[in-house]
Image (cartoon, helix red, strand yellow):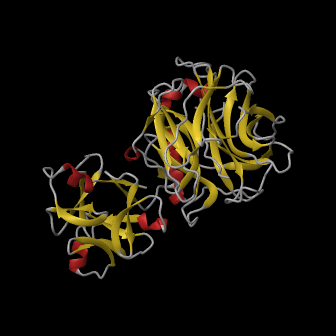
Amino acid sequence: MAITRRQFTLGALASSALTATGLAASPGAALAATYTAYVMTYFTESPNQSGANYGLHVAVSRDGLTWTPLNQNNPLVTPTAGDLGLRDPYIFRKQDGTFVVVATDLYGTNFGRNSQYLHVYDSTDLTSFTGYRRIRMHTYTNVHTWAPTVFWDAGRGQYAIVYSANTSTDLFLVNYTSDFRTASGPQTYFSPGFPILDADIRVSGGVTYMFYKNLSNGNLYGARSSTGAPNSFTTYTSGLRQGNAIEGAHLVPRNDGGAWWLWGDSFSPVNNDMYLWSTGNVGGNSWSVMNQRDYTPPLNSKHGSITGITDAEYNAAVNRWGTPNWVRLKSSNFPDYFVRHSNNAVRIDPYPFEPYQDQMWRMVPGLADSAGVSFESVNRPGQYIRHSGYVARIDPNDNSSTFRADATFYRTAGLADSSWSSFRSYNVPDRYLRHAGYVLRIDPLSSSSSATDRQDATFRVTS
């Protein structure tokens, strides 16, 4: 059985009650307009599990769509109790403005291992995650405690922790807490008559919205309640799915208040894409599939959660943990494809693939001209992308003038999209790196070239 990703609620920094948009009484809701960036927590897996890591990973984003992993995409902290690993980390801004992270107590993919606990961390400003502990949610035997989500229940004056369990069937339980150290006994929160997984909950305009997976048909659905109380939800959306299989519904309000996003995971380790929908009305039943060209999750990320953060929090996290010293190159017209090396050839292939490091490049000052760039392989250090007979490949740097020239490119505005990038050859200056038949080469291109040719030569530099 697969697990899920998680999500966050809108946070709390001040002490007022309701905003003009009617968000539930929460200090953070009053200052939602001050959130100018986003943070994501997640764990990592790759097709053959070479990229699997069950510590707490964190990424940041200015726009909520293109993500930058912190700490070189390594975990910031790793559990030291229970199963010694976490899945489905869910970050939530508490009433005092600080953060709490709750996560499934499970290492790896042995889903037959069942824990009564959740991992818990505290964070003041994303520069540290401290106070590590586990919180016991129930005393059942052979019952899992998966994929927690958190919301502030204003009527109770407590936080609700909702999670997937398998008591009489696959359903959601809820415990209430004031301090994320002790919690009330579990109650059935939602059990609609068919098995379910992966709750994600957000309160807006006096309505509590919950998205979940229906295990009977594999689709994601939205339900809502006027109170957020247990057993008070009614499903109101049609089923949603992208890819072959999906889970981990993950509901995110945009910081500008203009729309909502709904993320979903492929649950198979061999295809760990994240998918995205958008809507201008979370209470409606109209979700638009977003083009993968428009969003790039962190490398190998699984089952994440997202919340808005301030500019100060974004800068503090970046300054503390650092951004990657490598990049990836995403194709403009095949947006699920990334540039990678394979048997010394350089090509684009659909993500994910193994070895996943084949798509990671150090973009360094040009070997022939520091005003340009060269691309050094991360997992084959000392080898660079160069052209030979106009075809791209990676070769060891022999420090010859010919090699340095072949391996140097000028980064320009993207020929198909000026917000992306194209790369013009240093020593054959009318030619650009482009893919043709999925293989990279350099060809003569200009702004008057065909739309297809220009798209083939346009890439997003991301991480």
Residue 11 seen by the camera? no
Residue at the front extreme of this rendering: 217
Residue 311, percent from left and from top: 48, 38
290 to the left or right of 209: left
Nearest to the observer: residue 249 or residue 78: 249
Instruction: Please identify the quadrant where the C terminus is shown.
Output: bottom left
Q: Quadrant of residue 184?
A: top right
Q: Taking 157 as reference, is 419 above or below it?
A: below
Give the image location of residue 197, x and y in percent: 67, 42
Q: Is residue 286 above or below residue 337?
A: above
**Residue located 63% across and 47% down the image:** 4
Q: Is residue 286 above or below residue 144?
A: above
- Number of disc labels: 0
Position of residue 144 measured from the top left corner of the image (x, y, whole percent): 76, 48
Which residue: 24% across, 67% down?
Answer: 441
Q: Is residue 345 left or right of residue 17?
A: left
Q: Quadrant of residue 212?
A: top right
Residue under the image location 26 percent in, 62 percent down: 436
Is 186 left or right of 263, judged from the image as shown? right
